Image: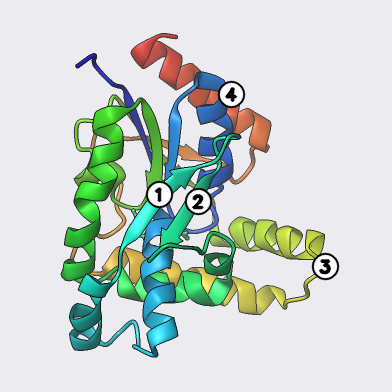
């Protein structure tokens, strides 16, 4: 099999990972895998069943009844299929994001999802974003980026997104949600969010989207060529 290349982009919630990874993947002709969407699908499934994401016994009992499929449409957009049902849009709420953060702390969940993520990288050139891609999922990734920004900047960006959708929220509530997710994602025992020694850190607090994409493009070209 020909060598495949992999680019890992990790970082906290709201750092802009998906937007940047998606745009770069399109340009480079790589697959894009948003791994957060997989954890969100687990959270959504448990939510429908009325299982609390903190309830380790409940999560363990029902996880085998969940089949997750990742499909790509003609435009290359990732779709999450939960037991045959397309839940791509249903999993995007703040509430499911928060529940995904809690459900992802269980080792049983992470173990089930590990091979699914690795299989994508075995078969394709891929840009994967998440929390533990460089540290656990693809420790041999050709390029590892740690994308971050201050919690205030991330909250502001989130406020802009909500405004664009015509939704209202208080800045303090959004900031608090981000800080809580940061805490949960960095303090769990299994595969916590942390920067690897061989990651390149990019603080995007004072950068535009275009500047971030340009910086990562440069890093990728230096490391693996065109
Ligand atoms: O990237 P996101 O906000 O959609 O991710 C939702 C949650 O899923 C995140 O708060 C923690 C968890 N997650 C994870 O534990 N590991 C990953 N590789 C991706 C996401």
Within 10 Å of disc 2 (Cα), the crowding (few <14, some 14-19, many 20+) is: some
Nearer the camera: disc 4 or disc 3: 3
Whether residues under marks 1 and 2 lie with C-beta atoms below 8 angstroms apart, the answer is yes
State how far apart marks 4 and 3 are (Cα): 30 Å
* Residue 61 seen anywhere in this rendered image of the structure: yes
Q: Quadrant of ligand 1?
A: bottom left
Task: Say which residue label 2 marks.
Answer: 79
Nearer the camera: disc 3 or disc 1: 1
State how far apart marks 4 and 1 are (Cα): 28 Å
**Is tag 3's residue or tag 2's residue first in the polypeptide sequence?**
2
Residue drawn where x is 38% and y is 66% of the image: 83
State how far apart marks 3 and 1 are (Cα): 29 Å
Task: Say which residue label 4 marks.
Answer: 214
Is the CB of the residue bearing disc 1 within 8 angstroms of ligand 1? no
Most foreground residue, 70 or 133: 70
Q: Is residue 8 above or below residue 170?
A: above
Q: Is residue 15 left or right of residue 141?
A: right
Task: Say which residue label 1 marks.
Answer: 70
* Residue 189 seen anywhere in this rendered image of the structure: no
State how far apart marks 1 and 2 are (Cα): 6 Å
The image position of residue 53, as x and y in percent, is 34, 82
């Amino acid at each position: 099999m020909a060598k495949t290349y992999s680019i890992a982009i990790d970082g906290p919630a709201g750092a802009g990972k998906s937007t940047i990874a998606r745009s770069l993947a399109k340009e480079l002709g790589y697959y894009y895998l948003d791994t957060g969407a997989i954890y969100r699908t687990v959270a959504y499934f448990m939510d429908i069943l009325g299982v609390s994401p903190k309830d380790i016994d409940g999560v363990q009992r029902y996880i085998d009844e969940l089949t997750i499929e990742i499909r790509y449409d003609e435009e290359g957009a990732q779709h999450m299929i939960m037991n045959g049902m397309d839940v791509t849009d249903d999993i995007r709420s703040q509430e499911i994001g928060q529940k995904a953060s809690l459900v992802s702390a269980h080792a049983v969940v992470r173990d089930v999802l590990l091979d699914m993520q690795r299989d994508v990288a075995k078969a394709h050139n891929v840009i994967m974003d998440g929390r533990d891609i460089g540290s656990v999922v693809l420790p041999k990734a050709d390029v590892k980026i740690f994308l971050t920004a201050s919690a205030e900047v991330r909250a502001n960006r989130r406020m802009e997104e909500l405004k664009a959708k015509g939704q209202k929220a208080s800045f303090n509530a959004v900031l608090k949600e981000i800080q809580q997710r940061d805490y949960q994602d960095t303090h769990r025992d299994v595969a916590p969010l942390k920067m690897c020694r061989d990651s390149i850190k990019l603080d995007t607090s004072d950068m535009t989207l275009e500047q971030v994409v340009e910086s990562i493009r440069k890093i990728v070209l230096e490391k693996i060529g065109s």
